[in-house]
Image (spheres, rainbow, N blue to C red):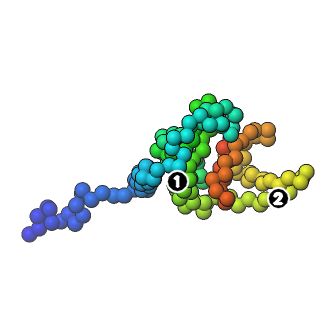
Amino acid sequence: MKTKKEKTEIPENIPIITPEMMEKTAVEIAKRRAGRKQSKLKGIKDIKCSSCGNDTMSYAQDLAFDVVLTGERIVISNLTGLKCSKCGEVTFDANSTKIIEKYTADRAGGGYELKISAVGGGKIGVYFPKDILRVMEINKSEKAILTPLSKRKMIIELLNSTE
Ligand SMILES: [Zn+2]
């Protein structure tokens, strides 16, 4: 005769790992990695900001990288780098850039392929896919900030966008 306990093959207290938990874990690992290595930018204070030109760029260790890639929001906190106290411009140090690359590289599969073409006047540019324009509500004269993360990766951040 079986007791109730024996019938239960899987104990109830076995944790089920959800994708959300995996994501959380990844962020936690990123946090720990960020804190491990000493930043080369540590100690830098009040240097010229490349964005607003004021001498208000200083070392910060509580920076967050926040991006939506292929419909998924990725937030990595506790990153180190420089932050402008005047305009909010952020530059991540080498270590933090590596962490960002690591956690954004996996998402590239669902991205949009763009062709780099000549757009006149000797300039080259890319055309945004129609889906992106519609979903992100990008308008013709809107301004954006482009931040190179490495020689092969960049982020385009829209200004004045309504979230
Ligand atoms: Zn600034």
Q: Callout 1, which amino acid?
A: Asn
Q: In the structure shown, which secondary structural element does the residue marked by tag 2 occupy?
A: strand
Q: Residue at x 20, y 63 (%)?
A: 8
- Give the labeled residue for mark 1: 95
Ligand 1 is within 8 Å of the C-beta of the residue at disc 2: no
Mark-to-mark CA distance, 2 and 1? 33 Å
| Residue 126: image location, x then y, percent | 78, 54
Q: Residue at x 22, y 61 (%)?
A: 11
Q: Is residue 159 above or below residue 73?
A: above
Residue 18 drawn at (x, y percent): 40, 56
Instruction: Determine which of the numbered discs, if any, sits on residue 117 in the image.
Output: 2
Instruction: Locate the C terminus by quadrant.
Output: top right
- As drawn, the residue found furthest toward the left would be 1
Instruction: Tell how many labels.
Output: 2
Q: Can you tell which quarter of the image residue 113 is in?
A: bottom right
Ranked by sequence position, the earlier of labels 2 and 1 is 1
Q: Is residue 157 left or right of residue 40?
A: right
Crowdedness near tag 2: few (<14), some (14–19) or many (≥20) residues, C-alpha within 10 Å: few
Work out whether residue 105 or residue 45 is closer to the camera in this orientation and state it: 45
Between label 2 and label 1, give the one nearer the viewer.
1
Mark 1, Cα crowd under 10 Å, few <14 / some 14-19 / many 20+, is many
Front residue (pair 117, 12): 117
Q: Are marks 2 and 1 in contact (CB under 8 Å)?
A: no
Which secondary structure, mark 1? Answer: helix
Q: Amino acid at mark 2?
A: Ser
Q: Position of residue 71 (x, y in %)?
A: 58, 51
Q: Residue furthest right?
A: 121
Q: Judge whether residue 111 can be spotted in this image.
A: yes
User: Residue at the bottom extreme?
Assistant: 1
Q: Residue at x 60, y 54 (%)?
A: 70
Quarter holding the N terminus? bottom left
Does residue 72 show up?
no
